[in-house]
Image (spheres, rainbow, N blue to C red):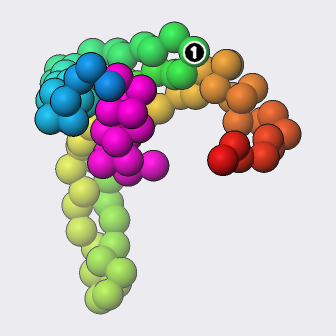
Amino acid sequence: MTKSELIEDVSRQMPDMSKRDVEIVVDTIFERMRDALARHDRIEIRGFGSFIAKPRRAREGRNPRTGEKVQVPKKWVPFFTCGKELKDRVNEPLQPKKG
């Protein structure tokens, strides 16, 4: 599912909201999630999962093209942990699509 498909789906479920308002809500949610991860805060969405920024240590890597050694600096990477409800739902047998 893409962001535009998400906006379309939410717009269909919320006929009282304009598509532009739904887009603002979706953008705001994603922006707040980006802000929280940039602050290294944990995001937990019950029934879905949690996001956290984890540190990755500095290391020595290699340029795949030349094989030359390069220093890769310490950095933070986003990490997602799936919640139990989502994991269970993903593992359910497929149901035929309606319509």
Q: Position of residue 59 (x, y in %)?
A: 32, 53
Residue 33 visible in image: no
Query: Which of the 4 quarters of the picture holds residue 19?
Result: top left
User: Which class describes the residues within 10 Å of circle 1: few (<14), some (14-19), or many (20+)?
Assistant: few
What residue is drawn where x is 69% and y is 43%? Answer: 98
Q: In this orientation, which residue lies closer to the viewer: 25 or 85?
A: 25
Magenta stretch encompasses residue 87? no
Q: Position of residue 35 (x, y in %)?
A: 16, 24
SS majority, magenta: helix
Extent of the magenta region: 1-14
What residue is drawn where x is 22% and y is 61%? Answer: 71
Residue 43 visible in image: yes
Q: In this orientation, which residue lies closer to the viewer: 2 or 11?
A: 11
Q: In this orientation, which residue lies closer to the viewer: 61 or 9?
A: 9
Q: Position of residue 77 (x, y in %)?
A: 32, 39
What residue is drawn where x is 27% and y is 20%? Answer: 16
Q: Is residue 95 above or below residue 55?
A: below
Residue for badge 1:
47
Q: Is residue 27 above or below residue 40?
A: below
Amino acid under disc 1: Gly
Left or right of 44 on screen, residue 77: left
